[in-house]
Amino acid sequence: MRLERTPGAIHKSDRAEKAARRMRREPTYSERALWKVLRKSDLHFRRQAPFGPYTVDFVCHRHRLIVELDGGVHDLPSVAARDTAREAWLTGRGYRVIRFRNSQQPDEILQVIHARISADTPTPNPSPQGGGELME
């Protein structure tokens, strides 16, 4: 059976799907704490989501935002190089990636996420007359 590919869709691999399931069952302490905060927020995040060949820690499709929690292993040059390639692949699909250390507090992370989202939200241009939208 062959799957039809939808243009523009991000297809997930079986390997990424299995890894995501395992990582959802066995989250780190930091992932569990951040997920608790994100679930209570007004944002709709998915956790340990398969994304193409990768599994991302948290993704908000509405705002095209990926949040990654990094431990000390990400300081190793080989892991940092993989992270760079992975981030290039993700940003190439129109998503922004924000990385945080595992040691950061979940409430602080949520504040940064909200600030980033609100900074990226354009404000509409009011018309010069002060009523309605600017028509050209």
Image (tube, rainbow, N blue to C red):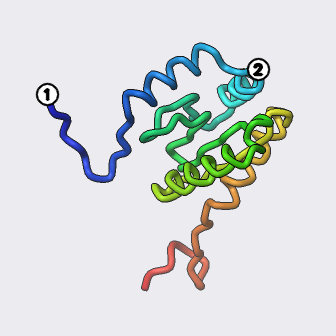
What residue is drawn where x is 55% and y is 57%?
A: 88
Q: CA distance from mark 2 to mark 1?
A: 40 Å
Where is residue 65 drawn, in percent x and y?
A: 59, 48
Which residue is the site of mark 1?
1
Q: Nearer the viewer, residue 122 or 94?
A: 94
Indicate the amino acid at tag 2.
Tyr
Q: Is residue 64 left or right of residue 73?
A: left
**Which label number is shown at residue 29?**
2
Work out which residue is located at the far left of the displayed protein and give it: 1
Q: Nearer the viewer, residue 134 or 30?
A: 30
What residue is drawn where x is 42% and y is 41%?
A: 52
Q: Is 73 placed above or below 114 here?
A: above
Instruction: Give the SS element for disc 2.
Output: helix
What residue is drawn where x is 45% and y is 55%?
A: 93
- Upstream in sequence: badge 2 or badge 1: 1
Work out which residue is located at the far top of the displayed protein and give it: 25
